[in-house]
Image: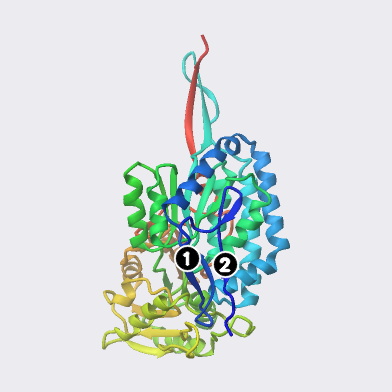
Amino acid sequence: MTTELRRLRNYINGEFRDAADGRTIEVVNPATGEVYATSPLSGQADVDAAMEAAAAAFPAWRDSTPSERQKVLLKIADAFEERAEELIAAEVENTGKPVALTASEEIPPMVDQIRFFAGAARMLEGKSAGEYMEGMTSIIRREPVGVCAQVAPWNYPMMMAVWKFAPALAAGNTVVLKPSDTTPASTVLMAEIIGQIVPKGVFNVVCGDRETGKAMVEHPTPAMASITGSVRAGMQVAESAAKDVKRVHLELGGKAPVVVFEDTDIEAAVGDISVAGFFNAGQDCTAATRVLVHESIHDEFVAALAKAAAETKTGQPDDEDVLYGPLNNANQLKQVAGFIERLPAHAKVEAGGHRVGDKGYFYAPTVVSGLKQDDEIVQNEVFGPVITVQSFTDEAQALEFANGVEYALASSVWTKDHARAMRMSKSLDFGCVWINTHIPLVAEMPHGGYKKSGYGKDLSSYGFEDYTRIKHVMTSLG
């Protein structure tokens, strides 16, 4: 007896549609490894239709007042709250995340972020009008950029979708959003909810694979392309967008250093760092997965961290005792396992280092010590529940190691010395520096990095401004 698979569909111009040519992708629940749905494998015709709808809807949405857009976004936030259980269920099936943590750690921030951007819509900023040349008055207009092509990742499918569509819609843009091919379910549900609130064509969802995203970015209609994904994907987007000088907004991952000095409370730091490293199976661009510890407390810290890892649980979504669920897909499980299999002889696995169970894509909380700065696992993003530990001798070497990677998204410093914390926060080459904490985010503060972590900001007024363009208007007083 076979169970009929759920059929997910694109949302274009206010209606749900299959791919024009009928092609589909199987969608797998990573907690079970079983197929539970199909989603469209959208091609050029589907992308064309979505872009046409977004372009047609843009003039009216652009010309709506900020207060009108605010009301719409507030309605979306309210609707997400009202249908939270459905969103949680879809996201858990997408990702295998723990139900309780998805409810507590994702829905409230998402709703808050939408409400923040609803307010930001009414707080457009620019220089004051004035006579900067005799006989002439200058004013600044801040306008939406147009149609936005947006590609969301699989690690936080719901929340990253919010980070993309909320500022774009608040600023007066229209959106064509593509979820990851492995996690389309919650985004399609979002389209159903949002579609009941916004005018048709303002918000569109196109499902598909890498080629679908490529077709979106290369399409002549969008004025802006935004992606959260790998460095390779970001480079491809930037290259494609350059052909017609599209704006590009890139968030491409990280390798966050966690710098622990000798005056740190080891027990407290290990508790926070282990959670920040293993949460969401380490599938977080800001995860605390690269720990640098002063040599004087290195051995004690490693022992405590290995103990914390051994006490951390991964398991099925309905188990309330687990911190994290599975890796998102079979390829990601293979990638994480590959890093451990290729460890150099001088490295030591202090905890974990193996798959958990034979169903789904679970990997044990892992701690690796004895590493050198140029080791593969130190330099490259693992994106799994793996924390590496290196020792350093002094502040200068800590900075050298911390900054000595190609990523520059987030970092943290652990010390009781305020002056040292300020020196480190000045010199760490990362878009965010936490002091004696790691991973909290708020809607009012920007998230984004430098170097190969990309450019552009999510959240905050800076993230909102990324979805606007500036126009100078000058008039003669004669």
Q: Earlier in the sequence, mark 2 or mark 1?
A: 2
Q: Which residue type does callout 1 highlight?
A: Thr
Q: Decide if residue 424 is on the left or right side of residue 310.
A: left
| Residue visible at 66% across and 44% down in the picture | 70
265 or 334, nearer to the observer: 334
Residue situated furthest top in the rendering: 478
Q: Are marks 2 and 1 in contact (CB under 8 Å)?
A: yes
478 or 430, nearer to the observer: 478
Label 1's element? strand
Hey, which quadrant is residue 223 in on the image?
Answer: top left
337 or 474, nearer to the observer: 337
| Residue visible at 36% across and 60% down in the picture | 233
In this rendering, is residue 415 above or below 407? Answer: below
Q: Mark 1 points at which residue?
A: 24
Q: Where is residue 193 in the image (x, y as percent from the top left)?
A: 66, 57
Kindly tell me whether residue 406 is visible in this rendering: yes
Q: Name the residue under label 2.
A: 7
Kindly tell me whether residue 466 is visible in this rendering: no
